[in-house]
Amino acid sequence: MRQQTDAVYLDLRKAFDSVPHDKLLVKLFSTGISGRLWEWFREYLSSRVQCPSGEHFGSLAFFNLC
């Protein structure tokens, strides 16, 4: 029996600060993304905290924490 494997590659780095997250979630839902995958995106976009870190860059380096 053959199995189908789907993959989606998203680069959210540039869109993270410039696209309203609620509008992005609505767009994902309208394209058919729902259920556990939609919940994953919702959690990913809403549970982000940034804190400065790094010796060489001082407060210029920020890392996202879950």
Image (cartoon, grey):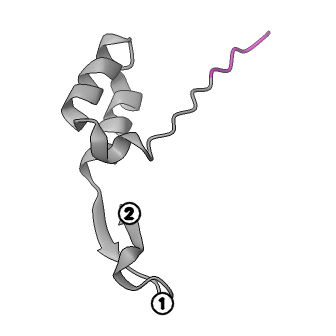
The image shows residue 57 at horizontal and vertical percentages of 45, 82
Residue drawn 40% across and 85% down?
Answer: 58
Residue drawn 40% across and 81% down?
Answer: 53
Please, which residue is most extreme toward the right here? 1
Amino acid beneath label 2: Asn
Residue drawn 34% across and 21% down?
Answer: 28
Amino acid beneath label 1: Glu
Query: With respect to residue 58, does 42 lie above or below?
Result: above
Callout 1 crowding tier (Cα within 10 Å): few <14, some 14–19, many ≥20: few
The image shows residue 56 at horizontal and vertical percentages of 51, 87
The image shows residue 61 at horizontal and vertical percentages of 42, 74
Task: Tell which tag, 1 or 2, sits nearer the viewer.
Answer: 1
Relative side of 1 to 19, left or right: right
Front-most of 49 and 20?
Answer: 20
- Residue 55 makes an appearance in the image: yes
Q: What stretch is highlighted in magenta?
A: 1-6
**Residue 56 located within the stretch drawn in magenta:** no
**Residue bearing mark 1:** 55
* Mark 1 and mark 2: Cα distance apart in space: 17 Å
Q: Which of marks 1 and 2 is nearer the N terminus?
A: 1
Quadrant the C terminus occupies: bottom left
Residue drawn 63% across and 20% down?
Answer: 6
In which quarter of the view is residue 64 placed? Answer: bottom left
From the image, give the main secondary structure of the stretch colored magenta.
loop
Query: With respect to residue 46, does 64 lie above or below?
Result: below
Front-most of 5 and 25?
Answer: 25
**Residue bearing mark 2:** 64
